Every structure is written in C-alpha cells, then in structure tokens.
Image (cartoon, rainbow, N blue to C red):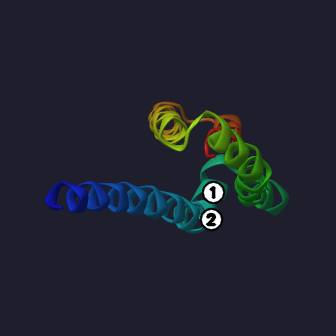
Amino acid sequence: MNENLKDKRGIVFSLLIASFLASFLGSAINIAIPIIGKEFKLDNVALTWLNTSFQLSSATFLLFFGKLADIKGRSKLYYLGISVFAVGVFFLFSLGTIYFYFSRELFRV
C-alpha cells in the first residue's frame, strides 16, 4: 500500500512539474514580449506572431501527440516531450536570434 502511494505521488509530482512549465513558459513569453521587441527592433506584427506561434504550435500538435501517446505509450512520450523541451530551452539560452525564438515554438509541444 505504501509503495502504491509513493508511485501515485511521483506521478502527480511529475505531471505538476510539466503543467507548471507549460503555463510558466506561456506567461514568460507574454511578459518578455516588450523586451524582445526592443532588443530585436521588431514591430507589433512580428511581436504578435511570437505569441501566436506559441499558441498555434500548442494547439496544432495537441491532438496528434495525444493520439500518438495512446498508441506508443504515455510514459515514453512524456519522457520524450520533457527531453525535447529541455533541449529546446538549452538552445533558447544558447542562441540569440529572433528566428530561433520563432522556431523554438515548434519544440514546445
């Protein structure tokens, strides 16, 4: 019974981390939009695309990866998603061009 409770707590904790990271990243993009605009001298259209690409990539791949998780296994796809997210965050902090920020949204799935 104790091991079962530990397993459930571990699952809930890992899901809470993933949920927090997704909402934190969305909020961080909204907060950083004015700074990104000043840094890269972007107009409002390009800044709007930054937020739109974030939301569009999330909505586009949600159903596809949900079905893929049903087929291949949820835990395998979860670990793959967290790994891709970590690599994307590493590249985000490594590179500093606006084109990379736009392409980074494809990794946020």
- Residue at screen point 68% across, 49% down: 66
In the picture, the disc for residue 34 is 2
Residue 25 in the image: x percent, y percent? 52, 58
Seen from the viewer's position, the closer of residues 69 and 88 is 69
Seen from the viewer's position, the closer of residues 78 and 45 is 78
- Asked if residue 18 shows in the view, the reply is yes
Q: Quadrant of residue 27?
A: bottom right
Residue 30 in the image: x percent, y percent? 61, 67
Please tell me how crowded label 2 is: few (under 14), some (14-19), or many (20+) other residues with Cα within 10 Å: few
In the picture, the disc for residue 38 is 1
Q: Single out the mark in the foreground, 1 or 2.
A: 2
Residue 75 in the image: x percent, y percent? 47, 41
| CA separation in Å, label 1 and label 2 | 6 Å
- Asked if residue 101 shows in the view, the reply is no
In the picture, the disc for residue 78 is none
- Residue at screen point 18% across, 54% down: 3
Q: Secondary structure at mark 2?
A: helix
Residue type at mark 2? Pro
Seen from the viewer's position, the closer of residues 97 and 12 is 12
Q: Relative to 95, does residue 98 appear above or below in the rendering?
A: below
